[in-house]
Amino acid sequence: MKNLEIKKISELLSEFPFLSAFFNDNGLEIEGKEELTLPEYFAALDEDEIEDRAIDVDNLMFQIGEFIEQMIAFLGKDEDIVKTVTILQGTDKSGNKEDFEKLEIHQGEIISIVGPTGSGKSRLLGDIEWVAQNDTPTSRKILINNDIPDKKWRFSSSDKLVAQLSQNMNFVMDLSVFEFVELHAESRLVENKEIIIKRIIDKANDLAGEKFSPDTPITSLSGGQSRALMIADTAILSKSPIILIDEIENAGIDRKRALKLLISEDKIVLMATHDPILALMGNKRIVIKNGGIHKIIETTDQEREILNELEKLDKTLSAYRTKLRSGEIIEKIS
Amino acid sequence: MNLVTVSGPPSSGKTSVILKTIDSLKKRGFKVAVAKFDCLYTDDDILYEKAGIPVKKGLSGALCPDHYFVSNVEEITKWGVDNKFDILISESAGLCNRCSPYIKGIKAVCVIDNLSGINTPKKIGPMLKSADIVVITKGDIVSQAEREVFASRVNTVNPAAAIMHINGLTGQGSFELSTLLYDESLNIETLKGKELRFPMPAALCSYCLGETRIGESYQMGNVRKMKMED
Ligand SMILES: Nc1nc2c(ncn2[C@@H]2O[C@H](COP(=O)(O)OP(=O)(O)OP(=O)(O)O)[C@@H](O)[C@H]2O)c(=O)[nH]1
Ligand SMILES: Nc1ncnc2c1ncn2[C@@H]1O[C@H](COP(=O)(O)OP(=O)(O)O)[C@@H](O)[C@H]1O
Ligand SMILES: [Mg+2]
Ligand SMILES: [Mg+2]
Ligand SMILES: [Zn+2]
Ligand SMILES: [Zn+2]
């Protein structure tokens, strides 16, 4: 960024519009000072101001350069598509080799992960997120698109491999549904923001049992509605190619459609769950034992039939629940 | 010895992250100790002791904890060197958004949490802006969107930092942090001659020195007045 020091702020802003967020978030007021260069701008701040606001001029010049480079990289690249993630054999807690050599997971696949508490489910997910290169306790290696992955997956704030959804998550911001999705869209610098926001809210309403409007405060959504919005937003706006699901509640949301939405957005879905309805929706399931991958089971036709049965049972159960909630006398549902 | 300074707002998860990270460091055979700095009160030393980690505690009382930290860090370093620790981690509460305990050439980690609100990164000064590693905690209880927005705000105020997400309760992510803390080529014997990354405010008014009476005639030293124009 050689020209950083000689260009006027107005020129920098028209070349790099995203810099206005940088100036704003760093508390640098530039209004009326657009015709100065950055060094002139910093030189014009008085000493008290520099001290009061803890402005570190050298560091800021460096950070601005860094920020511009990151943003150019971020905006310029065609989203580098993650088509496959490959797990290569490591060792279990006793140091023995795992019972598989290589597992290739493809875009659009749903993989369940099962095993008792402490068996190593979180570690496996951690290995994927950190794109382990024989440098974690399991000695596993992770490949992306059959290649040694780029370092950026570890440290960049905009290129995270894994996005997460779990039933412990809540909204904490004081915003309406629309404002919330808008904020996320803006931080992702998407074009055609309005269309994307509408699509997310429509999809979320599609998944939620009870509908909600764009001006509902996010903190007053029900559990199912919150989860539906989180899933729709993550499917459509999150850049992470892998979605990690740590159980999702069974009320107020259509989980099958939620998974379909994620896959239709070309995500890879990993689920740590012991709920048979969720687990059997996967194409495969990984069985973890003593820290190692013990088995990889493809969901069988018979299991799919059982899943059908379970879904029927589940519908009956929730029909009874609805009746109970609305104060009816419970009669046999056939 | 390696020295690592960890700082962050109150209750952001510093102790939780340090404890989990030390678990991983110990597994690699490192001898790790902690120096905890706070203002009025802390129980963190008990938590560290329980985990079998040697700990020293300092309370700054009426002083800014970061000022107190710099005045004592040399002694703490000597304690670490004398005891032949491989890694000494300092935990200090960032109570004063204006100061930071970071030293040039010493690894600086800032811990902040997702619950603190998306405008927090803007408000925290050098403690966040000049850290090498920013750890974001409590991602387990907020939505993916909020995590992404929060991380991008952190990135805007400190684009050069490595940003890591750690769950302080389960320790997920702490192994990864542990791999970034030890640098074989570094050996700190003393901090003499080292410099702070960012100067602490010079502010010293009569109230800093114990004055309690209100009124112009009692105000001495570095006094600044609000603008009251209408
Ligand atoms: N849900 C959740 N809670 C966390 C996480 N990290 C820390 N906590 C909780 O947050 C609270 C504060 O954590 P501490 O580790 O004591 O925070 P601290 O920054 O050391 O606090 P002080 O030293 O008192 O400033 C504790 O109750 C932790 O259990 C996290 O990632 N998720
Ligand atoms: N293959 C392995 N080798 C060594 N340690 C392991 C291995 N797999 C898991 N661990 C460790 O075992 C502990 C429990 O694993 P975790 O992933 O938290 O289990 P779960 O999520 O299934 O409850 C963690 O400390 C983890 O680092
Ligand atoms: Mg787990
Ligand atoms: Mg603490
Ligand atoms: Zn201070
Ligand atoms: Zn004072």
Image (spheres, grey):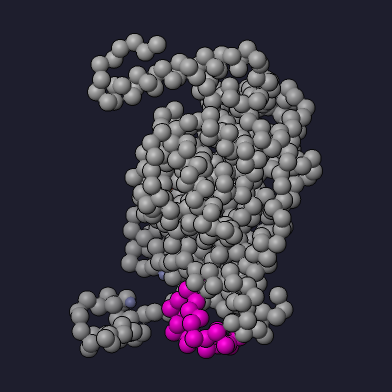
Residue at 65% in and 25% down: A283
Which stretch appears magenta?
Answer: A26-54
Q: Nearer the viewer, residue B138 or A262?
A: A262
Residue at 64% in and 44% down: A241
**Whether residue A300 is situated above or below residue A102 in the rendered picture:** above
Q: Nearer the viewer, residue A182 or B204?
A: A182
**Whether residue A190 is situated above or below residue A296 in the rendered picture:** below
Residue at 50% in and 16% down: A310
Q: Position of residue A290 (x, y in %)?
A: 63, 23
Q: Quadrant of residue B78?
A: bottom right
Q: Nearer the viewer, residue B187 or B144?
A: B144
Indicate whether residue A27 is drawn in magenta. Answer: yes
Q: Position of residue A179 (x, y in %)?
A: 43, 56
**Whether residue A150 is situated above or below residue A308 in the rendered picture:** below
Left or right of residue B128, residue B57 in this image: left
- The single residue placed furthest to the right in the displayed view is A147
Q: Nearer the viewer, residue B7 or B124?
A: B124
